[in-house]
Image (cartoon, rainbow, N blue to C red):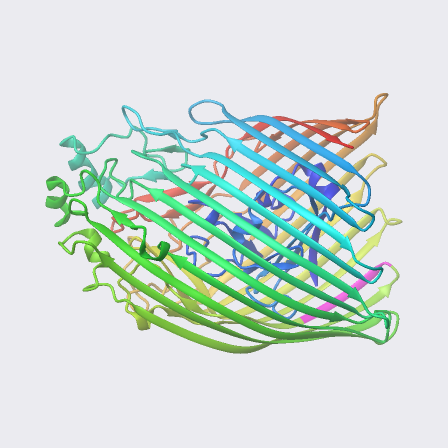
Amino acid sequence: MSVSALTADNLNDAGIQTMDDVTRQIPVLEVQTNTSAAATTFRIRRVGNLGNIPSFEPAVAVFIDGAFRGRSIFGASDMFDVERIEILRGPQSTLYGKNATAGVIGIYTAAPGDAFEWKGEVTAGMYDGQDGDAGLYRFKGGISGPLTDDLSGSLGLSYTGNEETMGNAIVGGGEATSELDRYAVRGQLQWDVTDDLGARFILGTVQQDDNNLGSPDYFYDPNGALGGVILPTMQALSESLTCKDNDPHNRKACNYVGTTADVESYEATLLVDYALDNGWTLDSITSFDQYEFRGTQDEVVQLMGPYGKYHDSHDNEAYQQELRLTSAGGETIDWLGGLFYYHSEFDRGDNGNRAMFLSDSASDDPVLESIIGLPFGTPGQEGYVDGSQDTDYYAIYGQATWNINDKFSVTAGARWQREEKDAYINQWVNDESPSVISYALSPFFAESGDMDRDTDEVTWSITPQMFVSDDTMIFATVSHGFKSGGYNAGFSDTPLDEREFDDEDIMHYEAGVKTEFLDGNMRLAISAFYTETDDYQDGVFVGGQFKVGNAEEVELKGFELEGTALLTDRLTADFAVSYADLTYEKNLTGQCDPFRVPDGLNGGCDLSGEHPINAPEWKGNLSLMWEDNTSWGDYYIRGNWSWTDEYNTTFSADPNWTQDSYSWLTFRVGTRWDAYELVAWVDNATDEEVVTLDAVPNIFAVEQDASVQSYMMAPRSYGLTFRVNY
């Protein structure tokens, strides 16, 4: 198994605050966030799903303290009280099960200790905002210790906030964008019931207010319908405001009104472990999680005026129970087996109580109607979507390792799983007068009803490994992975019988070596892999709607190298190289770019031979850290260089929109004395403008129009961090 791990000390030394920072240390991992934290997606070896479709389950499974989380949002918050992070690469469907076809992110928090301690961290800094420096503020704190002889507890909290980092180029005003406030709290209890029985209870919540954080930058094609006809006509008649910028990649937006997103998440986990007399261990994991999202985009028409509003909402609750029995270990055959059950209830549209599309003061503007043939909405018109998807997942799994001798072993495992999904969609308008809103949601155009599906599958893996010397191990893996299909449960005029997308089926092959040499001063891990995926689940954005379909065949091949070297007594190097060639071998229903004539099936384009979105072939990083003693304590200097190859930024592999290769530089200078630490740092030192997504406009996505809305990574930031740990 190929695993990358970061300890608490690694996280501290590198200044890691979120999973975005982890990607600078582990290049096989990628994080993409655009409209809000609820749209976060993780990718491992370039494989991952679009986070903007809330009913589209991820391909990278997130586990927090051993409990499965069905949405990436639970791994997208601040890192505090974290003991270690593990990145498991490649399909992990046998042991980890659901939604683990690309890999697994394991986040493990620190359990309460049996000695009293407290710690705190304060950061004050700046972003290089387009309208001047934007303040950046962070706080982390925690306390841990014994409550009684056999009961310990801990409480941790964090806050992250920043002012607006994007400018607004609207003439005469407009809101600056990308402002954030995020709070998180986690409490834990550790009860040593007996010498053999222990229980740990973990409760946490995150509250995030993205005030315009997900507002995109724009390019209005002057030769297209939106930027060449509709918008100029509206501006000439003073029906729309004017924007003095048309560069989609410079962090200057053209927002009449910004977007907002409020996200709340809650987690509760009970871990129980019981040591049996024969050395076996029985573990129980009981967990509940919930998140709520409320978003507004009051300029959904993107014409710099009050023409229409879009208010999205979705909620998800999930419960799980796992029982696992593990052998004592150290035997000829070591084994484990378990039972797993997971239930989730997803709802979009607040059960039909919150309108998704709303008319605005100029929705029935006669000029706009004369151009597009109908108004966006009539006065007071509202469109509603009530969508849901309930999931029940059952699994039985087992794994055994045959230790043939002290150098050679074979590990094999299998999992039987059944997944049942029931979906429902209902769409309507309060006024069926002709408009863009009624055309999208009126029952005359948009079908409503129930859908259900179920799947049974057996996944498996076989891994022989051999120690060819005391410090070198080689391994190989063959595994079969699986990811259940589902439904497009968002607003759409798609017929019910066309909303379903199919299961993914995966065959994976991998071989590698792990070694250390130079008297243990250098450690190295190398692996090569090949993965075939049939019916690869792929999301696109077209016609104002996110949709999921299946690419017939996708191929992934590549290799990885990572290691650590102690170059001198004071200088340490961490390095990694990732090559991953992810390609549509056959995709006849891909999204067409605006200038391409459909040449595939069902009005799609043949993207066979193209790379999916956000799939650079090469990535790498190098970190150097110098440490030395001083009269008052010690000091360190750390530099990190992360490099990413060029990649597609559109779902259609449009050659006109790509992100060039770029370097991301981070520097840290710090000193420690007694229980204190002070660090000066800079992130994205060269202020790279990095695009994660170029999408077609919300409404006016038409042929022969290159207009896009773009989402970007954060600009340069710098500041001071002070820590205390008692």
Q: Nearer the viewer, residue 355 or 22?
A: 355
Does residue 49 appear in the picture of this structure? no
Q: In this view, does 701 lie to the left or right of 677?
A: left
Q: In which quarter of the image is residue 546?
A: bottom left
How far across and down, in percent of the image, does residue 671 sit? Answer: 76, 26
Does residue 97 appear in the picture of this structure? yes
Q: How many labels does the image show?
A: 0
Vertical relation: 177 (above or below) 658: above
Instruction: Name the image quarter holding the C terminus.
Output: top right
How far across and down, in percent of the image, does residue 464 sit? Answer: 75, 72
Q: Nearer the viewer, residue 465 or 66?
A: 66
Q: Quadrant of residue 286?
A: bottom right
Q: In this view, does 191 lie to the left or right of 27?
A: right
Query: Is residue 474 in the magenta section?
Result: yes
Residue at point 18%, 47% (across, down): 377
Residue at point 32%, 34% (across, down): 255
Instruction: Name the image quarter holding the N terminus.
Output: bottom right
Q: Quadrant of residue 580?
A: bottom right
Q: Residue furthest front?
A: 148
Residue at point 78%, 65% (across, down): 274
How far across and down, in percent of the image, does residue 19 sit? Answer: 59, 46
How far across and down, in percent of the image, does residue 438 sit? Answer: 19, 55
Q: Is residue 343 left or right of residue 424?
A: right
Q: Give the range drawn in magenta.
A: 471-477
Vertical relation: 305 (above or below) 225: above
Q: Is the magenta stretch mostly helix, strand or loop?
A: strand
Query: Is residue 14 in the magenta section?
Result: no
Q: Which of 516 and 69 is in front in this view?
A: 69
